[in-house]
Image (spheres, coloured by chain):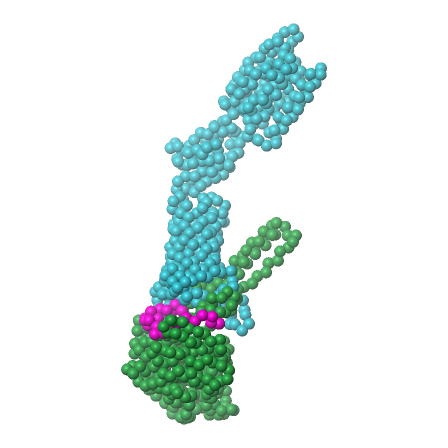
Chain colours: A cyan, B green
Amino acid sequence: MKKDRFLRAAAAAAILVLSAVPALGDEEGIRILVRSAGAVGDAWSASLVSALAGSALLDSVIPCPPGRDPAELAARLSCALAVDVESEAPAGKDAASRWRILDPLTYEALASGTITGPSPTARELAEYWWIPLVEAAEAALPKVKKTLVRVSAAPGTTVTGLSEEPMVIPEEGFLDLPLRVPVTRPWRAVSKGAYPESGYFAALEQGQNLEIPRRPLRLWTVEAGLTMLSFPEIWAHRNFGEDVYFIRFGMAQYLFGLYLVDEEYGEETPPAILSLPLVMPGAGFGMYFLPSDAYVRPYGYASAFARILLLSGAFGFDTVAPIGTNAYLGAEWRAFPRTAVFFEIGAAFYPFCDGFLMAASRGGQGNDGPYINLFGSRWFFEAPMIRFGTRFTL
Amino acid sequence: MNNRCLRFRVSWGSTARTSVASRLGCAALAAAALALASCWHPAFDPAISGSEAVIRKLGAPILWFSVEDVRAEESDELFFLPNAVYPPTVGLLLHFEAQRIILSAIEFNSITHTGLYSSNSREFPRGLGEQFTVLPAPAGGSDAFFVTGILEGRYVHSMASPLDTSDTNLEIVNLPSLPGAAWPPTFGIGTVAKPLDTMARLTWIGYESGTLLRFYTDLWNGGSAPGLGPVSDIQLPDEELISIPGKAVELESGHIFLSCGLIDGSRAIYRWNGSSDPAPIRFSEIHGPLTGALSDSRLLAEKDGVLTVLDNNLKRLFSFPSGRLRFVHERWDGTRMISVFSRAVFVRTESGDDIGRLKVEVYEIPTADLHKLAD
C-alpha cells in the first residue's frame, strides 16, 4: 500500500510537470499523448508516463483524460503521437499490456504489440516493463513528427526560417519541406534580381503551399533632398549589385534656399530666401549596409561635384573652388513601398581650391557654431553637413 | 554677426512618459538640426568668386600681402587704398561698417608679402552711405584724400605714418557747404583722373548756402590738401527731390554727372552738358549707381557686384563681375593710363573672436584694355 501511494504521488507529480511543459513554452516541441487503461492501478499509468518522458526524443507527455479518444485529442493538441495502452494483471496469471501507437492525423496505427510477463513489481514497472513500447514510439516518431508542406518560389530563391539550414528552391519552382503542422514560422526569401520577401507561414495542415512572391528590383530612384535644411537638390540613383551598391548623379544648387537667422541689433537681417548663382552637378558611389527590407537601412556614399558659376561675365567653373567632394552616412526609412525618407550627416572637402577665399566665402558664418572649418592654401574642409529628403523608387 | 543661428529651447518634463519623451526627443533633434542648419552659410560668395574670375584675366598682382591679427568680420566691406605708384609703397585700409568708416594704417613688405596691422585706427561717420570717395595723390606721393561725410573730408599727409588721435596726420578738408545750407548740403562728390597727366579732377555739387546750388571743381595732384574752387551755379530742376548724396563727376568731355537717391526711394543719374546746362537729362540707374569715372570719359556703375562701363550717354559698353575687386583710381605711368584695382579679403582665424587674417592684392590693367575683363 505504501509503495502504491508513493507511485501514485510520483505519477501525479510527473503528469503535472510533464503536462505543464507545453503550456509553459515550447509549443513546437514533440509531444505525445498517452491513454493508459485497464484494471490495473494508477502505478501503471504513472510508470508509463515516466518511461515515455525519459525518452530523449520526446519533449513532453500528456495524459489522456478518461473517456476521450486519444488520437482525436492528440490531433487537437498538436501531439506527434498518441499511445493507447490497455493493461491487465489477473491474479495468478501473467500481466499483459496491449498497446497501439497512432498517427493523430490519420488515426493509423503505426505500431502495436503486447507486453506480457509475470505481474511486474513497482520497480519493474518503472524500469523495464515499458521498454518495448518506448522503443516502438521512438521508432514511429519519424513517420509522423513532420508533415510535408510545399514552398513555391522562383528557382534559386533562398528561403530561411522554415528549416534549420537555408534552403534553395530548385528548378521545379517548389520544394516539399518536412514541417510539423500546425505551426507558424517566420520566413525570409532572397532571390537574385528581386526584393527580399518575408512573412509568417501558418502551416495548418499537411500539403499546405507557401507561395513566395517575387518583386523584381526597381533600380532607379529619384531623390529630392534638402542640404542643410536650406537648399533643395535633386539626384537620381541607379542601384546595382543586388540593390547593395548604387551610383548617383544629379545636381545641388544655391539658386534658391532658405536662410533663417536671428535678428540682431545693429545688423541688417538678411532675407529669408537666399539666392546665389552656383549649381553643383555631380556623381557619386555608395552602398547600403543592410538589405532593402530592413526597417531602417543605413548607407554611405561619396560624391564629387563641379561648381558652376552662373554669373554674367564669369560663367563656368568657379575658379575659387572648381570641384568639391563630400561623403555622407545616412539612414533610409521606407515610409511607403516606393517612398523612403532619409537623413544624412557628412562632410565636404574641396581640393585644388583657394582655401583662404573659400573660408572667406562663408559670408560671416560664425566660427562658434558646431562647425569645423579648416583650410589650407589649396584645400578647404567643412563639417558637419546634413541632408534630408525623400526618395521615390521609379 | 558672429552667431546669428536660430535658438530653440526644449523643455523636458521630469515626469514625462516614455512616448512623450520620445516625441520631445524627436522635436529636440529636429530643432537641433534646424538650429545647426540655420548657422550655416554656403562656402560660396559670388562677390569673391566673381572677382576671382576677373582676377584670372588681370594676371599676377603688382602687390600682395597677408596681415595677421586684423580685427574685422568676413561680411565687412574692406577697401585697400594704395598710393599711385608702381608698385605701391604705402596704403591705408578702409573698413566700412553700416554707420562708420574705420581707417587703419597697414605697413607691408612687398618682398616677404607680409603686413602689419595697426590697431591705432580712426573712425568716421559714414555720411555718404554706400558711396565713398577716396583718392591717393595722383602724383604718386604717400598722401591721400577721402570724404568722410556730407560736410567734410580728410587729407592724409602720409599713409605711411601711423594714425593717431592728434589729427596731425589727418587734416580736415571742409566741403563748400556753409552753415545754414539746405539739406542735404552735398548732392554728390567724386574724382576722375585727368588723361595723360598726374592730376585728378575733384567735383562737388551741393548747396553752398541756403538753397544756392553750386558746382565746384578742382584739379589736384597731391602734396597738399585739395581745394575746391567755385565755378558756377548749376541748374537742377529736380533739386528738391534729392535726398541721398552720391557720386558727382565731371568728365574730360565736359559732361557732368550726378548719381544720387531721391526722396521717393528711387535713384537717378543726371547729366549736364556743361555747368551752364540749364536742363540736365535724367536717367535711370539701370546698371546701378555710378561708382567712378575714367579719364577717357567713360563711367563706372556697379550693381550686385557687377561693374559696368558706360559711355557718356550712359550706354552700356561692357560689364564684368568685379565683386570684392574694387576700382581704386587711374594713374599715368608716362605712356598710358592705368586702372588700379584692389581686393581685401578677411578670414577669421580665432574661434569666438573677430580676429583673423587679411589678404590684400593690388592689380593693374591699362585703361584701354578694360574691355578684356569682359571677354
- Residue A144 point in image, percent of width and height: 51, 23
Q: Which residues are magenta?
A: B48-72
- Residue B242 point in image, percent of width and height: 46, 84
Question: Along the line of sight, which residue is nearer the eye, B219 or B160?
Answer: B160
Residue A348: image quadrant is bottom left
Would you say residue A51 sits in the magenta stretch?
Answer: no
Q: Residue at x 46, y 61 (%)?
A: A373
**Relative side of A158 to B369, left or right:** right
Farthest residue to the right: give it. A1
Question: Along the line of sight, which residue is nearer the eye, B217 or B63?
Answer: B63
Q: How many marks?
A: 0
**Relative side of B7 to A255, left or right:** right
Farthest residue to the left: give it. B335
Residue B291 can be seen in this image: yes
- Residue A244 point in image, percent of width and height: 41, 45
Q: Residue at x 38, y 71 (%)?
A: B113
Question: Along the line of sight, which residue is nearer the eye, B363 or B357?
Answer: B357
Would you say residue B60 sits in the magenta stretch?
Answer: yes
Q: Residue at x 47, y 82 (%)?
A: B148
Quadrant position of the N terminus of chain A in the picture: top right
Q: Residue at x 65, y 26 (%)?
A: A16
**Relative side of A158 to B336, left or right:** right
Q: Is residue B358 above or below residue A207?
A: below
